Amino acid sequence: MSDNQQFDPTATSIFGMTPVTEDAEEAPVALSARDREAVEALPAGSALLIVQRGPNTGARFLLDPEVTNAGRSPKADIFLDDVTVSRKHCQFIASGGGHIVRDSGSLNGTYVNRERVDSVELHPGDEVQIGKYRLTYQPSTKHA
């Protein structure tokens, strides 16, 4: 403390912490060469969800059928084994050559690009957050 400051025993001081700003958000993870090859090989109308952060980082999930269910239930098409994920968390629905993600009334919500959503159309590179999992949406580059 400098000589011109008075000590206040009721004040709270925080040392060593920096404020969190929007600039401090984690940068998006770039696709690896293997992931790019996998996306290029996808048939028209399908997509990959690639786990970028959280358990199973690097795992890939194929969105191919009309509806793909994601959740903590072992019966889910995309099984995400973590307590932050609801048993029936969300659905990925094929729509017009792309996909829509629809929350299934999950406790912790489904987020796209850090915004909580009920249902939204996905775009290439969108980040979908399901509990601790952060996945990027990579649709096929081929057209039907």
Image (tube, rainbow, N blue to C red):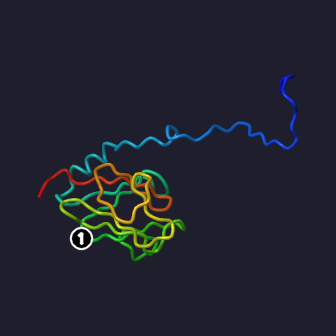
Tell me the element at label 1.
loop
Quadrant, the N terminus: top right
Residue 43 placement: quadrant: bottom left
Q: In the depicted view, which residue is nearer to us: 75 or 132?
A: 132
Q: Residue at x 87, y 30 (%)?
A: 6
Q: In the depicted view, which residue is nearer to us: 34 or 25?
A: 25
Q: Give x and y (percent) for residue 79.
A: 42, 69
Q: Give x and y (percent) for residue 121.
A: 29, 59
Tally of marks: 1
- Circle 1 residue: 66
Tag 1: Cα neighbours inside 10 Å, few (<14), some, or many (≥20)?
few
Residue at the extreme bottom of the image, as rendered? 75
Identity of the amino acid at label 1?
Glu
Q: Decide if residue 22 is on the left or right side of residue 138.
A: right
Q: Against 18, is 38 above or below?
A: below
Residue 143 placement: quadrant: bottom left
Quadrant, the C terminus: bottom left
